Image (cartoon, rainbow, N blue to C red):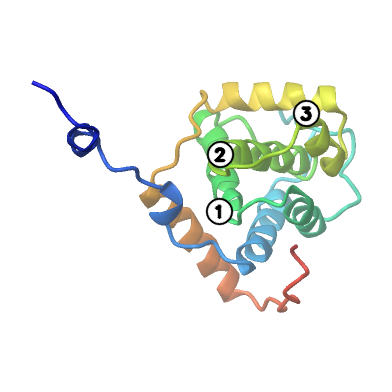
């Protein structure tokens, strides 16, 4: 008995594009996320008793979180959905490691690493770690170490269900909508 290609294709599950299962994050999501992360990192001022991680800098970067996220959005040239994923990934670290606190000393490195991982996992096209390091203002060797450590912290779990994605996207959009946020020009985020 011979089977045709058509018969074999009928038995295979249909290809599901995860990008089609979730609502679009939208251009304003990055702005709302910046506001949420700025607030979150300000809740825990850097303290001497805080556990220092590989993500900590000696002093807070001069570039505000909002500007840093806009820089990442512009030069990473990734889908806006990657910014939802980056938040999920950062939250996974906090949930899996309750002693890990987010503050002004580690949020920038957490962001560049989490968005880079999201791009590699979710988008079809991505750049080298050297490129991401340059955009993020860190050395390539450091971004490589941060990537490895981040993956260990989240136990290599990069998959995000559509429900989880929508939950995080909706939460940020709701919080962002509650705050007066200036509108950006269409080209401000790339």
* Label 1 to label 3: alpha-carbon separation: 21 Å
Q: Which residue is mark 3?
A: 143
Left or right, 114 with reference to 128 = left
Q: Which label lies toward us, 2 or 1?
A: 1
**Residue 85, percent across and down?**
55, 46
Task: List the single residue furthest toward the left.
Answer: 1
Query: Residue 47 occupies which quadrant of the picture?
Result: top right
Q: Residue at x 17, y 35 (%)?
A: 7
Element on which disc 2 rests: helix
Query: Residue 160 occupies which quadrant of the picture?
Result: top left
Q: Residue at x 76, y 50 (%)?
A: 72
Crowd class of label 3 (few under 14; some 14 to 19; many from 20; radius 10 Å): many
Query: Residue 94 occupies which quadrant of the picture?
Result: top right
Q: Which residue is mark 2?
A: 89
Quadrant location, the N terminus: top left
| Residue nearer the viewer, 83 or 74 | 74
């Amino acid at each position: 008995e011979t089977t045709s290609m058509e018969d074999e294709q009928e038995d295979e599950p249909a290809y599901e594009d995860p990008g089609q299962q979730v609502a679009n994050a939208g251009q304003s999501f990055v702005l709302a996320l910046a506001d949420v992360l700025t607030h979150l990192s300000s809740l825990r001022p850097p303290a001497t008793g805080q556990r220092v991680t590989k993500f900590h800098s000696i002093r807070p970067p001069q570039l505000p979180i909002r500007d840093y996220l806009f820089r990442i959005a512009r030069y990473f040239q990734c889908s806006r959905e990657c910014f939802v994923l980056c938040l999920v990934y950062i939250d996974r670290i906090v949930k899996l490691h309750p002693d890990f606190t987010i503050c002004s000393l580690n949020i920038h490195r957490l962001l560049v690493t989490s968005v880079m991982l999201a791009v590699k996992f979710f988008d079809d096209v991505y750049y080298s770690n050297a490129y991401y390091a340059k955009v993020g203002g860190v050395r390539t060797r450091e971004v490589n170490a941060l990537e490895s450590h981040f993956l260990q912290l989240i136990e290599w779990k990069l998959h995000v269900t559509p429900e989880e994605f929508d939950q995080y996207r909706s939460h940020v959009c709701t919080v962002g909508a509650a705050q007066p946020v200036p509108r950006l020009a269409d080209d401000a985020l790339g």
